[in-house]
Image: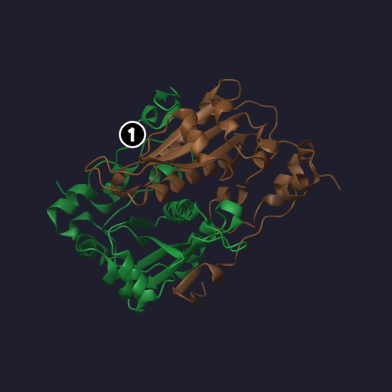
Chain colours: A brown, B green
Amino acid sequence: MSLTAHEVHALKKAPSMEGVLPAFHERWSPRSFAAREVSAEALKKLFEAARWTASSYNEQPWRFIVGLRGDGTWEKIFAALGEFNKNWAKTAPVLILTAAHTRFSHNGTENRHALYDLGAASSYLTLEAAALGLAAHQMAGFDPEAARKAFGVPAEYLIGTVIALGYLGEPTALGDAGLIKSETAARARKPLDEIVFSEWDKAAGI
Amino acid sequence: MSLTAHEVHALKKAPSMEGVLPAFHERWSPRSFAAREVSAEALKKLFEAARWTASSYNEQPWRFIVGLRGDGTWEKIFAALGEFNKNWAKTAPVLILTAAHTRFSHNGTENRHALYDLGAASSYLTLEAAALGLAAHQMAGFDPEAARKAFGVPAEYLIGTVIALGYLGEPTALGDAGLIKSETAARARKPLDEIVFSEWDKAAGI
C-alpha cells in the first residue's frame, strides 16, 4: 500500500477537540520534503511566532542559525547530522540550528531554564509552520560539538536541536522501507492519565 | 492612570502579522487573576494541546501535577514558591508543577532534551490557554527541591516550572505599585535580527 503525501497528512492528524487550536492536532514531524523552497515571508512568520515566546526574566535566550540549501550554512548544519538523519534530511530545503544562552544578561548568573525556553520557542516555530502548511522536524540526532565547532558557538551557549523545514513530500520518495513505514504510521501519544496528576502517582482524572 | 483588565489585555497584545496564529500575539503572562474557577473541560483542552507536542524519540517526558485551590495539591505547590511570586500567585485558582523524566524509557540512557521537550509541552499548554481566553504565567521563582520533597519526585525527574493559571484579573487588585506597573507595561521582545542568524554573529536579515 503506498500512500500519497496528502493521504499521509490526513492520517497523521490527531482527532480534533472543540476549542483546541487545530494546529496542535495537525502538526507532525515528517521526513519526506518536497522539492519546493520556503519563502522569506514564510520564514519570517515562523520566527515572529517564536519571538513572542515567554521566557525566564524575559531573557529570550534562543538563537536560530538558518541555512537554505546551497548557502553554505545549510551544508555546515547538515554535516553535523547523524547518518540516519542525513539519509532523509537531505531533502529539506531549510535546516535550522537552535542554541540557548545559559547566562542571564542582566547579572551573568546561570539561567537554568535556558533549554526549557529554547524548547518553547522552537515549538512555537514548528506550530506556526503547521499553521502555514509547512512541515518541520526537530532532531536530537546530530553531533552538537561538531555544530559548535562549525559555527564557533561560545561555551556559554547550549546547542539544542536541528530543525528540518520545508513542504511535505511523497512518502515513497524516502526510498528506505523503514522510513516509509514510520512516515505512514498513525501518530501516538500517552493518554492524559499518564501525564496529568494530582499527586506524584495519582492521575488527575481530567 | 488605572487600567482595567480589558484595557491591559489590549495593551499587551503584540502587533499581529498576517498568517501568524493570533494566539502567539495574544498570549502574555499576567499576575492578576480574577475570582473565577477554571472548568475541568477547559483544563482538559490545555493538556490535550500539550499532549501532542513533539519530543525526542516520542518519549513525552513531561509530567504535570495540577492543583486547584483548596485541594491540598495547590497548597503544596504554593508553599514552594518564592515570596515575590507568592505575593501575586495567591489569586491564581490553578497551580501546575511541571517535571520531566531525564531517562529514555526504551533504554534507560540520558535524555538530554527532556527539559527542552518539557518547555515545548508547557508552551503549547499556555498558548492553548490564551486561545481559550485564559491567562497563564510560568514561574522559575520557586524552590525546586522543596517541590520535589513535597511530592516525592524521583531523582530521575527534573523539576521545571510552576504555572499559575486562571482568568485575567484587574491590575489594581495586585495592590503593590511595582506589580501594577509591570502588569500594565507593554510587552517587549528582541527584534528578529537579534535572534535569527545565518552565521553565529551574522544576522540573517529576515
Who's the residue at 47% across and 54% down the image? B128
The quadrant where residue B70 appears: bottom left
The chain containing the residue under callout 1 comes to B
Who's the residue at 28% across and 47% down the image? A57
The quadrant where residue B82 appears: bottom left
Who's the residue at 47% across and 32% down the image? A149
Who's the residue at 54% across and 27% down the image? A67
Residue B18 in sight: no
Q: Position of residue B51 (x, y in %)?
A: 55, 59
Secondary structure at numbered mark 1: loop
Q: Which residue is mark 1?
A: B190
Q: Position of residue B80 (x, y in %)?
A: 28, 69
Residue at the right extreme?
A1
Crowd class of label 1 (few under 14; some 14 to 19; many from 20; radius 10 Å):
few
**Nearer-the-camera pick, A184 or A70:** A70
Residue A149 in sight: yes
- Eyeballing the image, is B151 above or below B173? below
Q: Position of residue B37 (x, y in %)?
A: 37, 69
Q: Amino acid at mark 1?
A: Lys
Residue A121 in the figure: left or right of residue A87: left
Residue A121 in the figure: left or right of residue A134: left
- Eyeballing the image, is B7 above or below B161? above
Q: Position of residue B204 (x, y in %)?
A: 45, 24
**Nearer-the-camera pick, B67 or A155:** A155
